[in-house]
Image (cartoon, coloured by chain):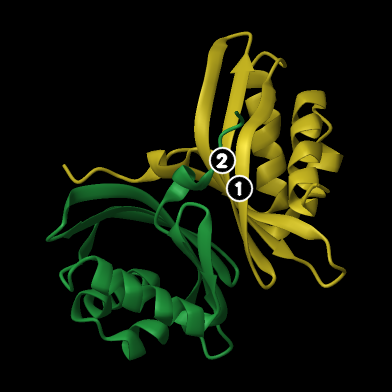
Chain colours: A green, B yellow
């Protein structure tokens, strides 16, 4: 079965993160995209997302690895939700699987771009205490 | 702090589900919305979503209860992702908390409508076996 174009975009994003190829990576985001950098801290817009990825690369000793261990895509018109088991590791971080959630929007030329990138899934919900 | 309009919409939806007021409930969905009825089975479009909710009401002995135990909303332009701890129960089902994911789109008149309703979160990911 052919891969969904969004699955290809996520593969391209993962490769670009590993290669620290931020030009290619940023092409996969919408202009007003939002990235959860860590629970409670978001980067909004391409410029801040690029800065966040640059800082993340340094933080993880330029050795961040990322891959997807299963995903499902739900599509409604020009909007799609991705549920993914995202596996990350780095020289200073053991292999960690996150229940990631990504939203993609189909642009006027038919390309799916990421508008909401939340690899932390439900971890971002604040506790009532 | 004022509630986000999407949080109000979800409250309205929960009340409508409990009251089995499907006219009110369906007003909260986009025309081409997709509802995960159970992992692997989706209802697409208002007509099929209504039929699914009617069947769900009967299945749960007309006693389905639903509320949210914490949520977070990530907004990007006219698209928003909701991560929610959704608590459901029924006469024939113990209290169950689901890691729900909802996508809303802002319509031309400024109303946020649900386009993707996946209360099962990552449970819909198929296992590779």
* Residue in the picture at 15% in, 57% down: A92
Residue visible at 69% across and 38% down in the picture: B51
Q: Position of residue A42 (x, y in %)?
A: 52, 64
Frontmost of labels 2 and 1 is 2
User: Is residue A17 left or right of B111 when viewed as pictured?
Assistant: left
Q: Is residue A102 left or right of residue A85?
A: right
Of residues A25 and A103, which is closer to you in this image? A25
Query: Marks 2 and 1: same chain?
Result: no
x and y percent of residue B66 in the render?
Answer: 67, 26
Instruction: For mark 1, give the secondary structure.
Output: strand
Residue annotated with mark 1: B72
User: Residue A23, located in which quarter of the rendered image?
Assistant: bottom left
Residue furthest to the left in view is A91
Nearer-the-camera pick, A4 or A124:
A124
Q: Is residue A2 visible?
A: no
**View extreme (top): residue:** B91
- CB within 8 Å, label 2 to label 1: yes
Above or below, B99 relative to A1: above
Tell me if A78 is positioned left or right of B17 in this view: left
CA gap, disc 2 and disc 1: 8 Å
């Amino acid at each position: 079965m052919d891969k969904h174009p969004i699955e290809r975009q996520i593969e391209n994003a993962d490769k670009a993160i590993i290669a620290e190829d931020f030009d290619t990576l940023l092409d996969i985001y919408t202009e007003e995209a939002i990235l959860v950098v860590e629970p409670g801290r978001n980067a909004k817009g391409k410029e801040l997302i690029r800065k966040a990825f640059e800082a993340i690369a340094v933080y993880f000793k330029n050795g961040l690895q990322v891959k997807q261990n299963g995903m499902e895509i739900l599509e409604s018109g020009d909007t799609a939700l991705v549920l993914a088991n995202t596996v990350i590791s780095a020289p200073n971080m053991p292999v960690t699987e996150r229940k990631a959630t990504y939203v993609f929007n189909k642009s006027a030329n038919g390309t799916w771009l990421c508008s909401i990138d939340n690899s932390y899934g439900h971890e971002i919900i604040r506790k009532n205490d």
